[in-house]
Image (cartoon, grey):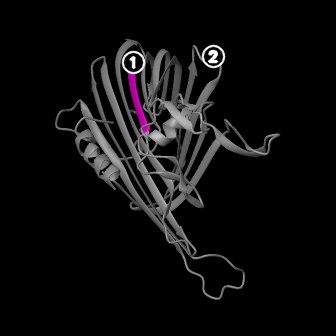
Amino acid sequence: MKNILFLLSFLSSTLLISQDSLPLNAQDSLAKTDTVKYWKHGGTIGIAVQQVSLTNWAAGGQNSISGSGLLSVFLTYQKGKLSWNNNLDLAYGVIKQGSNKNWWKNDDRIQFTSKVGLQAIKKWNYAFLLDFKSQFAPGYNYPNDSTILSNFMAPAYALASLGMDYQPNENFSMFISPLTAKITMVYDQKLADAGAFGVKKAEYNTDNLGNLVLLHQGENIRTEFGAYFKMLLKRNVMENVIFATQLELFTNYSYKPGNIDVNWTTLTTLKVNKYISATLTTHLIYDDDIQIVTGKLKSDGSPEIGPRTQFKQVLAVGFSCKF
């Protein structure tokens, strides 16, 4: 709860200075022009709830209730050759199923992006981009809710990138950078000690009694330097149907050069009316530094752990409001 309150406070201050030229959730909103004509701002807030109740249901099943919410806002500035685009996306969802007494989260996302550009030639800008990603609440190895897999600021990813930005129109943007610093933060010490998300894990030694002795705690920060690519696209597929996608690629120059981290999201929005809409979101991640139990066993019988392609899909129908 403290983390959520902190993020709400952060949002309040950020709304005064923020939001990206092509957000997945907010760009379809009605942009409002500030009294100063160079500024534009807008956003979308959405809430969806689903409930299933079964009584003497012969086919079987479980009662469930779930809810999710999202907030996406943007703020842009354009004057002459100078542009500044900011975007903030927040999402959180929970589900309670069957006899389970606890709520389990099924969606959790924080992303803030800020990009400053200076026109070089027509449709191309020199650009500097900052990006931050994290989550609100702890994530567990469900149904085992005692084994924590992630937490607020564990991981968190900060990225600073200098490059060129191609934007022929408001529906497409492509950013290319050969100079990028990526910082991975794990501020949950148990996860850091385990070497989660690619940080250097803790070092131990064995004393004369066979007990493990901690020599060095796991590091909380890992810094990488490499190349970065980001592409955003939005299209009106048909009347009241909007498709948007964002693809991010990063490769490290010094550690496994040529190995590419992938972060790809899509959003399909079907507008029923002014306040009701259905959304289908997908999120694909591949990061060689994130180790996941593969489901296979090693020769010694222990579980095999390694990088895997992660995929999430969320289908929601609910209330949405533009501002």
The main secondary structure of the magenta stretch is strand
Nearer-N-terminus badge (1/2) = 1
Q: Which residue is mark 1?
A: 127
Q: Please say whether residue 272 is visible from this viewpoint.
A: no
Given residues 290 and 264, the one toward you in this image is: 290
Residue found 43% across the figure and 45% down from its top: 135
- Hey, which residue is sitting farthest right in the picture? 299
Residue density around tag 2, few if under 14, some if 14–19, many if 20 or more, within 10 Å: few
**Residue 194, magenta (yes or no):** no
Q: Is residue 18 left or right of residue 160?
A: left
Mark 1 nearby-residue class (10 Å; few <14, some 14–19, many ≥20): many
Q: Amino acid at mark 1?
A: Ala
- Quarter of the picture containing the N terminus is bottom left
Work out whether 292 lies above or below 77: below
Residue 82 figure quarter: top left
The residue shown at (60%, 49%) is: 312
Q: Is residue 252 visible?
A: yes
Q: Which residue is mark 2?
A: 257
- Where residue 159 sits, quadrant-wise, is top left
Mark 1 or mark 2: which is in front? 2
Check disc 1 and report its element: helix, strand or loop. strand
Q: Residue furthest front?
A: 208
Place of residue 201 in the rendered image (x, y in percent of width and height, measured from the top left): 54, 31
Estimate the spatial distance between the alpha carbons at disc 1 and disc 2, rounded to whole Å: 24 Å
Residue 92: where, in percent of width, then height? 44, 54
Per the rendered image, the range of residues in magenta is 128-133
Residue drawn 57% across the image and 27% down it: 249
Taking depth in this image into account, of 298 and 221 the one nearest to the observer is 298
- Asked if residue 132 is among those painted magenta in the image, a careful observer would answer yes
